[in-house]
């Protein structure tokens, strides 16, 4: 997270373009999510964040506790995707590739 007074990247015009960005974190809250679901319409992209607290792999039903709903425009979603892509590429450059493919289950013999 950015410290107070720091300028972020990609959130809008930069200081080089003549505009200073002031981050007001007076109403900010922190949360944790290990699940995200995304849906969209023509006018908006809806992000649902939550927590999967299912610990047993054999369970027939998984309950996700939803904690946050974020609604953004498709333009903001595209910018967010570009920002996240850059962050992940930098992460992988420093720490190695992330494998997000589901593991293939072994066939019973």
Image (spheres, rainbow, N blue to C red):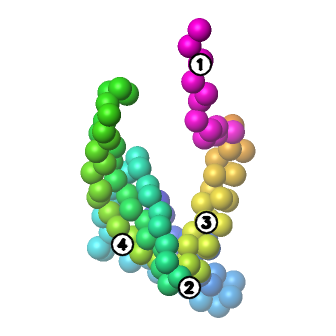
Which disc, if any, is residue 106? 1
- Which residue is the site of mark 4? 25
For disc 4, the neighbor class at 10 Å (few under 14, some 14 to 19, many from 20) is few
Between disc 3 and disc 1, whose residue precedes? 3
Q: Dot 1 lies on which element? A: loop
For the point 69% across and 52% down, which residue is it? 89
Q: CA distance from mark 3 to mark 2?
A: 23 Å
- Mark 1, other Cα within 10 Å: few <14 / some 14–19 / many ≥20: few
Contact flag, marks 4 and 1 (Cβ < 8 Å):
no
- Would you say residue 78 is visible in this rendering? yes
Report how many numbered discs are placed on residues in the image: 4
Labelled disc at residue 77: none
Magenta residues: mostly which secondary structure? loop
Of pointers 3 and 4, the one earlier in the residue sequence: 4
Residue 18 or 87: which is nearer the viewer?
87
16 or 34, nearer to the observer: 34
Range of magenta residues: 97-109
The residue identified by callout 2 is 20
CA–CA distance in space, label 3 to label 1? 34 Å
């Amino acid at each position: 997270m950015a410290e107070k007074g720091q300028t972020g990247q990609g959130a809008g015009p930069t200081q080089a373009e003549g505009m200073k960005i002031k981050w007001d974190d007076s109403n900010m809250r922190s949360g944790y999510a290990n699940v995200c679901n995304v849906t969209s319409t023509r006018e908006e992209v809806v992000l649902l964040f939550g927590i999967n607290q299912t610990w047993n792999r054999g369970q027939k039903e998984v309950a996700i506790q939803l904690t946050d709903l974020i609604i953004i425009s498709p333009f903001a979603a595209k910018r967010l995707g570009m920002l996240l892509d850059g962050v992940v590429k930098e992460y992988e450059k420093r720490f190695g590739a992330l494998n997000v493919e589901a593991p293939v289950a072994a066939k019973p013999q």
